[in-house]
Image (cartoon, rainbow, N blue to C red):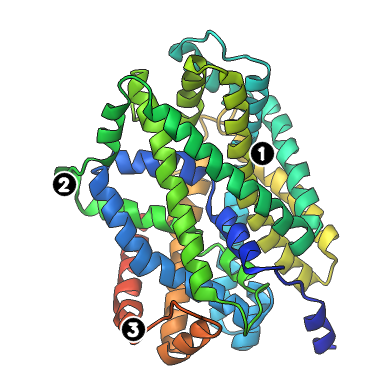
Amino acid sequence: MKKANKAKREKWGSSLGFIMATAGFSIGLGNIWRFSYVAGNNGGGAFLFIYLIIIVLIGLPIFLAEAGLGRKAQSGIITGIRKLTRRGSPWVLIGWIGILAASLIMSYYLMIMGWIFAYLIQVIAGGFSGMTPEQIAAHYDQLISNPLAVFGYTLIPVFIIGLIVSRGVRNGIEKFVKISMPLLLLMLIILAVYSLSLPGAMKGVAWYLKPDFSAINAQTFLEALGQAFFSVGIGLAGAFTYGSYLDPVKSDLVKGSVWVVSFDTLVAFLSGLVIFPALFAFHIAPDSGPGLLFITIPNLLNQMPGGMIFGFLFFLLVVIAAVTTAVGLIETISANASELLKIGRKTSVWLWLGLMVILAIPSILSYGPWAAIQFFGMTIFELIDYVSGNILLTTSGLFISLYVIFHWTFDHFQLDINTGSTTLRITPMWKPIIYVIIPCVILTILITGLI
């Protein structure tokens, strides 16, 4: 019976499919606005340098460990960890924490995707034409405070995500990302080139990229670590799930993971070259926070020849970036539910999407009628974001690190990860990084997040 189940498990059609899908899972709204915003407020080019070091020394190894465990287990994260250890093992907490984090993030991610679809429709209708920056900012505030409108827009991505994931790994997810991810990259390059040509744009580039070492402090390192976890998707069980669809012997996990992390970082960097030159060109404050994407781009489009066309393509591709991340989250949740509850893929996908819609309601209301409800000084949305991002992701990442040290051991980790590798390989020099640097740094993030 076990052999039959194993034979039925889907596989990626190619290594490109794994790279595009996993990069799509990593690339999302955090890359489009959060990376640029955090970089600009933490030393610009100095932050970028620190971030790249953290990605190489911490992000990539933990990503490799999580994806490698999935490839080794050839199943979802909960049943996979049980298979690699034993039923009732405390290491199974890695799976439960990852699934919980994915569920909480998906609940508010749907809300933000609703905002983006609203903007996409607004751009198509030419609704931003002639608006001043102040009017555009007011429009954003009006939208997010209207729960019925946001909920309605949220149902659009739910339907799209359900159609993609329910079709399966190869026929649904892989086909979608092979088209969508190259288009996203191409559009970002086009927009970056145009944004850089605007009068005054170079001031934005200098603000974004010029190293300001006076702005570097302990908080900068913590911001870079948190961004690395959030951006790459460490601790969300997505890398484990997507890794489980790889061939356990023939796939080149190291090279594929390097491509995924590189693609993720490139998109984040390019997004900054789109947003910050435009900000300075239109004299908009670079500390606009979460509304940055919804204020800057409409202003940019109002000044562009054929702005409506560019606006449609940009917000469409931002939607694609958000959808590919959401697809990874739902695939992770529903695949594990399908294995645990013994239900079919389609049933599991639509069941959990329905549950996510219900879980999204408190976050949606936290910008409207429930805005005054706060816990520990945070709105409902802010609390969910804080718990999932600052606590659950780092806890899951810490457990993965400890699993490698105490259960997998470095020698077996190195052997398993290097299986199928053709050029890039894990070498013994990674041992002190994995045994000392990574757990200490992650523990620091976790403690800081709790204080």
Which amino acid, by three-letter code, is at mark 2? Phe
Local secondary structure at mark 3: helix
Give the residue pinned by disc 2.
213
Residue under the point 58% across and 38% down: 318
Choose between 105 and 214: the one closer to the eye. 214
- Please tell me whether residue 425 is drawn above or below residue 172 in the rendered image: below
Q: Can see residue 284?
A: no
- The reply, left or right, for residue 226 in relation to residue 12 is left
Which amino acid, by three-letter code, is at mark 1? Ile
Other-residue count near label 2 (Cα within 10 Å), few / some / many at <14 / 14–19 / ≥20: few
Tell me the distance, in whole angstroms, between the alpha carbons under discs 3 and 1: 45 Å
Local secondary structure at mark 2: helix
Quadrant (top left/top right/bottom left/bottom right) for the N terminus:
bottom right
Q: In the rendering, at what x and y percent does residue 52 appear?
A: 33, 58
Which amino acid, by three-letter code, is at mark 3? Lys
Q: Which mark is residue 431?
A: 3
Q: In the rendering, at what x and y percent does residue 170 appear?
A: 75, 63
Tell me the distance, in whole angstroms, between the alpha carbons under discs 2 and 3: 30 Å
Q: Can see residue 354?
A: yes
Q: Earlier in the sequence, mark 2 or mark 1?
A: 2
Q: Quadrant of residue 78?
A: bottom right
- Please tell me whether residue 173 is drawn above or below residue 138 in the rendered image: below
